[in-house]
Image (spheres, rainbow, N blue to C red):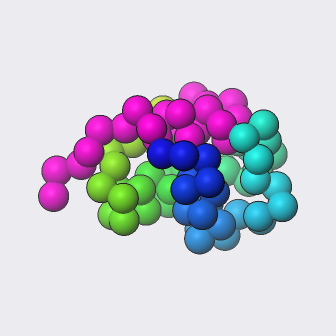
């Protein structure tokens, strides 16, 4: 997933657009445990991507989150 695609999803779950750059820290952007759970759900539901919450938790920046999502497996329908 490209960063701009991830950014669109992050905005859709309520994160502030002005805080979202590839260098922004995950927690700094507001991607806390609840938001991570919601992000994983949206990615699975809308994007068909099976990304584990642990993979997102392990990312330090939003750029790393995008990389983790890029490596996500396609979820079974």
Q: Is residue 3 left or right of residue 15?
A: left
Residue 17: percent from left, percent from top: 76, 64
In which quadrant of the rendered view does residue 18 lie? bottom right
Q: Nearer the viewer, residue 13 or 2?
A: 2
**Residue 33 visible in this rendered orientation of the protein:** no
**Residue 4 visible in this rendered orientation of the protein:** yes
- Residue in view at x 79 percent, y 41 percent: 24
- Residue in view at x 32 percent, y 45 percent: 50
Please state the extent of the stretch shown in magenta in the rendering: 56-77
Q: Is residue 69 magenta?
A: yes
Question: What residue occupies the far left of the structure in this picture?
Answer: 77
Compared with 37, 53 (above or below) is above
Compared with 60, 15 (above or below) is below
Q: Is residue 75 magenta?
A: yes
Q: Is residue 48 left or right of residue 68?
A: left
Q: Is residue 49 left or right of residue 67?
A: left
Residue 3: percent from left, percent from top: 61, 47
Question: What residue occupies the far right of the structure in this picture?
Answer: 18
């Amino acid at each position: 997933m490209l960063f701009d695609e991830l950014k669109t999803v992050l905005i859709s779950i309520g994160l502030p657009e002005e805080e979202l750059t590839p260098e922004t820290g995950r927690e700094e952007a507001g991607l806390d445990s609840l938001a991570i759970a919601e992000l994983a759900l949206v990615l699975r539901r809308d994007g068909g991507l099976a990304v584990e919450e642990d993979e997102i938790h392990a990312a330090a920046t939003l750029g790393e989150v995008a990389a983790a999502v890029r490596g996500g497996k396609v979820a079974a329908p």
